Image: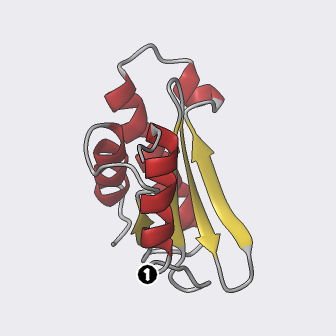
Amino acid sequence: MSLTKSERRQRIKFRIRKIVSGTAANPRLSVFRSNKEIYAQLIDDANGVTLVAASSREKEISATKVTSIETATAVGKLIAEKAIKAGIENVTFDRGGYLYHGRVKSLAEGARAAGLKF
């Protein structure tokens, strides 16, 4: 039985989500990566709400013409700024079934550089 790329990622995602969950004090930083864009949200799983969200589609990020890695770093910094403004400093990182490499890694490093702890 051979799995498609998306089915394989879904299995990995479910395996991660069994362990990782977020609370209001320590939300989950969830990353979604499409071919063109990258999205990040802070989620409180206990109440089922998104606290803060940022993406590469926001005006201040999409206006700049840079590489996808630099865009991901900018999204990481933006989500960290929004989180700190909302009073959140500690998060749990959820890579969403993607490898911790490339755009996912640069988003995490951008968020760390802007002050989030995980």
Q: Position of residue 78 (x, y in %)?
A: 50, 47
Up the image or down, 116 lies above or below 113; here it is below
What residue is at 42 percent from the left and 60 percent from the top?
Answer: 12
Q: Which residue is mark 1?
A: 19
When asked about the image quadrant of residue 70, the answer is: top left
Q: Is residue 76 left or right of residue 110?
A: right
Q: Position of residue 89 (x, y in %)?
A: 44, 75
Colour scheme of the rendered structure: secondary structure
Viewer-proximal residue among 108 and 96: 96
Q: Is residue 63 left or right of residue 51?
A: left
Up the image or down, 78 lies above or below 62; here it is below
What residue is at 29 percent from the left and 47 percent from the top?
Answer: 105
- Which amino acid type is shown beneath numbered disc 1? Ile
What residue is at 27 percent from the left and 37 percent from the top?
Answer: 102
When asked about the image quadrant of residue 83, the answer is: bottom right
Q: Is residue 84 left or right of residue 52?
A: left
Up the image or down, 53 lies above or below 35; here it is below
Label 1 packing within 10 angstroms: few (<14), some (14-19), many (20+): few
Number of numbered markers: 1
Quadrant location of the C terminus?
bottom left
What residue is at 45 percent from the left and 50 percent from the top?
Answer: 9
Residue furthest out toward the front: 1
Label 1 element class: loop
Up the image or down, 15 lies above or below 103; here it is below
Q: Position of residue 115 (x, y in %)?
A: 35, 63
Q: Position of residue 80 (x, y in %)?
A: 46, 58
